[in-house]
Image: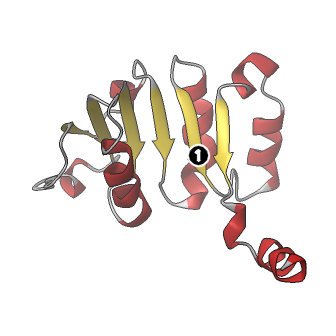
Amino acid sequence: MNIGIIGHRNHAAHMLRLVARHRDVKLLRVFHPDASKLVGLKSEGVAVQVEYTSDLRDLFHLDAVIIASPSHTHASYVLELVSHRPFVLCEKPPATNREDLARLASLEDALRAKIMFNFHLPRTPLFQHIQTRLS
């Protein structure tokens, strides 16, 4: 599999290391819109090929893309990518305003089926409260 990751620090870097451990992953392509942010980046200790790009189109023909960029960019990246081939895993939240949320909700079912949002519920206060009550 060839996977793209939008973002290069923090959670995106964690996702890169996590995904790189999967035996079926052959290529990781890291995207950041500002090419200067990618200069000198190295993925030491990662056993797969890692490429860096500031051209979003370089992600269009990958098998999947993980969006781990700032929250206010999530909806625009999802909407741009989903009309192309990749499946999209987007970190929470899906959108930061009602307009973007409405745009995501209005996608046709075939496109929506290619998107997954990672809410990581075990870290939410509600889940922790329920877990405490059930223990």
Is residue 37 shown left or right of residue 123? left
Q: Quadrant of the C terminus?
A: bottom right
25 w.r.t. 15: above or below: above
Q: Quadrant of the N terminus?
A: top left
Is residue 43 shown left or right of residue 134? left
Label 1: few (<14), some or many (≥20) within 10 Å?
A: many
Q: Which amino acid type corresponds to the residue marked 1 in the rendered image?
A: Cys
Residue occupying the point 47% across, 35% down: 65
Which image quadrant for residue 107?
top right
The residue tagged 1 is: 90
Pick the residue in front: 107 or 29: 29
Residue furthest front in the image: 135
Residue 39 point in image, percent of width and height: 13, 53
Residue 90 point in image, percent of width and height: 58, 46
Pick the residue in front: 30 or 32: 30
Secondary structure state at the residue bearing disc 1: strand
Residue 56 point in image, percent of width and height: 38, 33
